[in-house]
Amino acid sequence: MIDIENTINEYLRKLPRCTRYVVITSPKYGKNDYRCELIVSVKDLLPWAENNLKILSGTHKSDNEIHAATKALPLWLRNADLLNHNSSWIPYYMYRVIEGGINDFVVAKKAKIFCCECQHFVKDITMEKLDFRKEGDTSLWTDEWHCPQGHLLYYHENELRFSFLYGTRK
């Protein structure tokens, strides 16, 4: 059995100290959906990380690295150098922890959005749901975000399938 506390402490020792701002997604992270950089302050990211830890604390975790990163993220953020206004780049497994909540920071207007095409921060972005269609028990649509200059910031094809169970087995 793995000692998760030792794994977390070892993981944190290897990381550079967090700064006041964190780049939560970037094309540099290897995800093709985002063609922009989203930067969130530690003061906004820390409550999310602490809540995420509470939510996941009662679930089974089969991936030790994700489990360690979920527990390590709030500790790393709490130890941030708030006087350093540079942005921190998150490690891979912390990105994996955050990636499901990235859009929430944009919708809540808690992320600074850097258009990689314009090479500027942008405030007013267009968020569209395109090509919505239903095919049986499946809904399909495309999410696109654009900066004021029309550059594509985010593109994701979505598929949501509904499965209904009828009756119960005895």
Image (cartoon, helix red, strand yellow):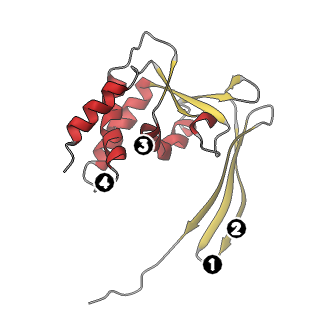
Q: Which residue is drawn at 42% across and 40% down?
A: 93
Q: Mark 4, mark 1: which one is toward the viewer? A: 4
Callout 3–callout 4 Cβ contact below 8 Å? no
- In the drawing, what numbered circle is on residue 133? 2
Callout 3–callout 2 Cβ contact below 8 Å? no
Image location (x, y in percent) of residue 27? 63, 36
Q: Which residue is drawn at 40% across and 21% down?
A: 16
Question: What residue is disc 1 on?
Answer: 136
Instruction: Tell me which numbered mark, 1 or 3, is placed earlier along the sequence.
Output: 3
Count numbered badges in the picture: 4
Left or right of 156 in this view: 57 = left
Q: Real-space Cα distance between discs 1 and 3?
A: 32 Å
Q: Mark 2, mark 4: which one is toward the viewer? A: 4
Q: Real-space Cα distance between discs 3 and 4?
A: 12 Å
Question: What residue is disc 4 on?
Answer: 61
Amino acid of disc 2: Arg
Instruction: Tell me which numbered mark, 3 or 4, is placed earlier along the sequence.
Output: 4
User: Is 86 rendered above or below residue 122?
Assistant: above
Instruction: Tell me which numbered mark, 3 or 2, is placed earlier along the sequence.
Output: 3
